[in-house]
Image (cartoon, rainbow, N blue to C red):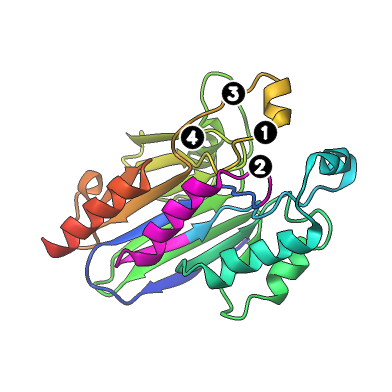
Amino acid sequence: IKWFQVKVNDPKPTGWGFVGDPPLGSNCHVSLLREDVKIMAETEGIHCICLGDTVDGWGGFLTKLYAEEDVSRNTEQRLAKWFLQDAGIPWRVFLIGNHDTMGVFSTYLKAINADKIPMIDWQAKFRLAFQNGSEVKINAAHNHKGTSIYNPLHGQKRAALWEENADIYVAGHHHNWAIQQEELSDGRVVILARSRGYKWLDTFATRHGFSNHQYGASIIFVVNPAEEIPTRRLKAFADLKEGAEYLTWLRKK
């Protein structure tokens, strides 16, 4: 996986929304997703990254769960098309998660990607390149390797310590959320984050005793490229509305 550049032709602060797993279908918290889509589509200066699992796409040993669905494959494709093309979300990077690879959905998503948004399997490493020469390096994955019952950001911390240097390490996949900003021993200030996603009615999670988090469906990072102090340069919000309001204030300021 190679680093690539995302040019930002906006001198003002920008927001980068990392959209957690929807997945579009019977298990999706639709009303919350619509609220957040409206914020992402209508707030000036927001750019978005999909963390994968756009659809349930049940396949393999999970096919038995498809019996619990009342959404057809065709409807899932229509919902995926709405999410990618018609909802007005300003996508900049789009990840393919494990559920997207079940059946034909990853092929379908790539086929309808008319805007040629970078659409990458599982993980993307990219640099936000601003007009003043400032850069923010982001390591985004459907999930990073490593888990711990004591730290929901174990995979992100592992990536920050052992993988290539970045400013932000963010993932989805686990249907929980967390944010952590810290200064590492080498002086880097990093943000570790996980988006919860919009899968609320999850029988698998219920049967296996996983917690049902209520917040952090998507995480937004506000970047001020004119600021040199890292703790002021990057701010993370677990609430899209609050993050969008902060971004709007900062752009006016």
Q: Nearer the viewer, residue 243 or 163?
A: 243
Q: Percent x, y for residue 96?
A: 67, 58
Amino acid marked by disc 2: Asn
In the image, taking residue 31 as reference, residue 107 lies left or right, namely right
Q: Give the structural element (helix, strand or loop) at label 1.
A: loop
Structural distance between the alpha carbons of marks 2 and 4: 18 Å
- Mark 1–mark 2 contact, CB under 8 Å? yes
x then y, percent, for residue 231: 24, 44
| Sequence-earlier tag: 2 or 3 | 2
Q: Which residue is mark 1?
A: 202
- The verdict on residue 45 being magenta is yes
Mark 2 or 4 closer to N-term?
Answer: 2
Task: Work out whether 22 lies above or below 204.
Answer: below
State the residue at coordinates (45%, 58%).
Answer: 37
The mark closer to the camera, 1 or 3, is: 1
Q: Earlier in the sequence, mark 4 or mark 3?
A: 3
Q: Which quarter of the rendering shows the N terminus?
A: bottom right
SS class, disc 3: loop
| Residue wearing tag 4 | 177
Q: Report the Cα–Cα distance between label 4 and label 3.
A: 14 Å
Look at mark 2 in the image and give the residue it sits on: 27
Crowding near the residue tagged with mark 3, few <14, some 14–19, many ≥20 C-alpha atoms within 10 Å = few
Amino acid found under the numbered disc labelled 3? Ser
**CB contact under 8 Å: marks 4 and 3:** no
Q: The disc labelled 4 sits on which kind of residue?
A: Trp
Task: Please report the residue visible at 57 percent of the width from the left and 23 percent of the height from the top.
Answer: 211
Viewer can see residue 183 = no
- Front residue of 150 and 115: 115
Give me the residue at 19% from left, 55% from top: 228
Span colored in magenta: 25-48
Looking at the picture, does residue 215 appear above or below residue 109?
above
Q: CA distance from mark 2 to mark 3?
A: 26 Å
